[in-house]
């Protein structure tokens, strides 16, 4: 006696393809940045606000000049800030 085994079609994985033809648009500045705290904000042509990251060099300069509170680095994630 021969057993008959019904086989199901195997599902194959089709990798997603990257969408082509879509360029990343970078908003252009409409003038000098507005200084707010330690970050600069730019308003682009499409009225989106873009925040410029603080560079390591400027952060190091602020640390050397003493403008950053030294106790800030002593806090941990589990304790609330004073």
Image: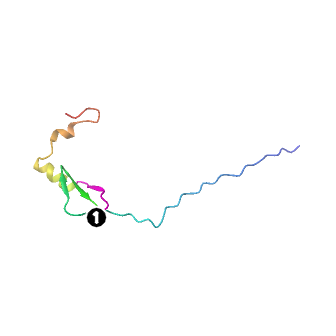
Q: Which residue is mark 1?
A: 28
Label 1 neighbourhood size at 10 Å, few (<14), some (14-19), many (20+)?
A: few
Q: Residue at x 26, y 35 (%)?
A: 76
- The x, y position of residue 38, in whole percent, is 19, 50
Taken as a whole, is the magenta stretch helix, strand or loop?
Answer: loop
Q: Is residue 9 shown in magenta?
A: no
**Residue 41 drawn above or below residue 79:** below
Q: Which quadrant holds residue 78?
A: top left
Which quarter shows the C terminus?
top left
Residue at the far bottom in the pictured view: 21
Q: Residue at x 54, y 58 (%)?
A: 16
**Residue 5 drawn above or below residue 76:** below
**Residue 68 drawn above or below residue 57:** above
Q: Residue at x 60, y 54 (%)?
A: 13
Q: Residue at x 19, y 56 (%)?
A: 34
Total numbered circles: 1
- The x, y position of residue 70, in whole percent, is 15, 41
For the residue pair 23 and 48, the one nearer the viewer reads as: 48
> Magenta part of the protein: which range?
45-54
- The x, y position of residue 5, in whole percent, is 79, 46
């Amino acid at each position: 006696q021969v057993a008959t085994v019904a086989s199901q079609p195997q599902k194959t994985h089709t990798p997603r393809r990257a969408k082509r033809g879509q360029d990343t648009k970078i908003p252009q500045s409409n003038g000098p940045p507005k200084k707010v705290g330690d970050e600069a904000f730019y308003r682009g042509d499409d009225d989106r606000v873009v925040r410029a990251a603080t560079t390591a060099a400027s952060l190091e300069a602020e640390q050397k000049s003493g403008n950053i509170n030294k106790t800030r680095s002593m806090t941990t994630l589990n304790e609330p800030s004073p």
